[in-house]
Amino acid sequence: MVAALIVISILLVAYIIYAYMKSNQGNSATVFSPQGGKGIPSSARSSAASAADDEEATRVRVVGPRLVRVMGGLRVGDEMPMTTPFTIGRGQSCTYTFHDAEMSSSHAEFRLDGSQPIVIDMGSTNGTFVNDQKIDANSAFPLKDGDQVKLGTMFFLFKQVQ
């Protein structure tokens, strides 16, 4: 029974990734801007303001390393470019804040180490997974094109090139 649920979950994620990639070939994508796109420190944002800022996200063509939300939350398909280091978590001090009970306040950091994109689990309670492999806390883990990253209940797809 458990094995069947795992297989179904994997197939669902694979389908979502396929459908996203198929529907966005050559299209623009919604890009989250750090700090809600308004230059307001995330610590000063309310949940309602954060949601409103997300609705005003700009449609642009993204090139280079980025994370794409493929499952979890309401805005599947949003992209987070890795032009500067960013953090993801529940806490308002994070660059990108998600209301996910399984996600830690400061869950993970994404950045470039030279030209190599990496993810660092920031000591999260439930861990950070890359392609279903739990990564070590506080250690850099290299990302490659097509890697699936799980934070809490959310899934992201790492894209290296356009």
Image (spheres, helix red, strand yellow):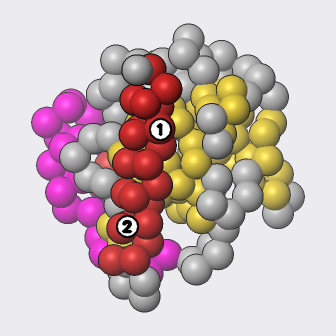
Residue drawn at the location 54% of the way across and 26% of the way down: 107
Give the residue furthest to the bottom.
26
Side of 15 where 108 appears, left or right:
right
Q: Which residue is mark 2?
A: 20
Q: Nearer the viewer, residue 155 or 101?
A: 155
Nearest to N terminus: mark 2 or mark 1: 1
Could you tell me which residue is drawn at 22 percent across and 46 percent down? 74
Q: x, y percentage for residue 125?
A: 56, 11
Q: Position of residue 42 (x, y in %)?
A: 37, 36
Q: Which residues are magenta?
A: 37-62
Q: Is residue 61 magenta?
A: yes
Q: Secondary structure at mark 1?
A: helix
The residue depicted at 68 percent of the width and 26 percent of the height is: 134
> Closer to the camera, 136 or 11?
11
Residue located farthest toward the top when viewing the structure as drawn? 125
- Tell me the quarter of the picture where residue 59 sits: bottom left
| Amino acid on which disc 2 is placed | Tyr
Q: Is residue 8 visible?
A: yes
Place of residue 93 in the rendered image (x, y in percent of width and height, measured from the top left): 45, 28
Q: Residue 28's mark?
A: none
Residue mark closest to the camera, 2 vs 1: 1
Residue 62 sits above or below residue 111 on the image: below
Q: Is residue 140 shown above or below 32?
A: above
Quadrant of the rendered image containing residue 127: top right
Would you call the spot at circle 1 few (<14 residues within 10 Å), some (14-19), or many (20 or more)?
few
- Asked if the residues shown at circle 2 and circle 1 are in contact, with their CB atoms under 8 angstroms apart, the answer is no
User: Quadrant location of residue 38?
Assistant: bottom left
Which kind of residue does numbered mark 1 sit on?
Val
Image quarter (top left, top right, bottom left or bottom right) of the C terminus: bottom right
Please give the residue where the numbered disc 1 appears in the rendered image. Answer: 7
